[in-house]
Image: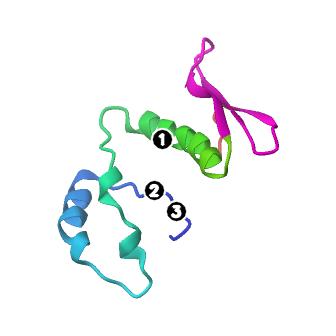
Amino acid sequence: MFASTALLLGRKTYEGFAAVWPTVKDEAGFADRINWNNTKVLSGNVVAQVRALKRDGVMAQATRAGARIVKKAQKTFWGGYAGYFQDPDDHLWEVAFNPAFIPKD
């Protein structure tokens, strides 16, 4: 769980966690990693919203690793989503997401 960057909860579970979690202490320190300040409430097409959070996470991860955003990720004319970043060695990378091309597990 320490490698996770997100926790997806249903409404009732979230409400229970949010009420109790600030008082929880555990030896592993997991409770301290939960930060309710950056909570995102999803509604409507939750699957599409989770996909959007994942794809935006790639750009955020690149930034944390020292990359510079060249072009912020945005919707494309072909129905996808793409952006560009430059890594610390000056290599240019494109991050692209095509919702029509999701491989089967």
Q: Residues within 10 Å of mark 3 (few under 14, many from 20)?
A: few
The residue to which callout 3 is attached is 4
Discs 1, 3 touching: Cβ within 8 Å: no
Q: Residue at x 31, y 82 (%)?
A: 25
In which quarter of the view is residue 71 placed?
A: top right
Quick one: SS at disc 3? loop
- In the rendering, at what x and y percent does residue 19 appear? 17, 65
The amino acid on which the numbered mark 2 sits, given as a three-letter code, is: Ala
Residue at the limit of the structure toward the left, as seen here = 19
Discs 1, 2 touching: Cβ within 8 Å: yes
Kindly report the distance in space between the C-alpha atoms of the residues bearing marks 2 and 3. Answer: 6 Å
The answer to if 71 sits in the magenta stretch is: yes
- Of mark 1 and mark 3, the one earlier in the sequence is 3
In which quarter of the view is residue 78 placed?
A: top right
Q: Nearer the viewer, residue 9 or 28?
A: 28
The amino acid on which the numbered mark 3 sits, given as a three-letter code, is: Ser
- What range of the chain is rendered magenta? 68-94
Q: Nearer the viewer, residue 91 or 16?
A: 91
Q: Residue at x 54, y 38 (%)?
A: 56
- In the rendering, at what x and y percent does residue 96 appear? 66, 30
Quick one: SS at disc 2? loop
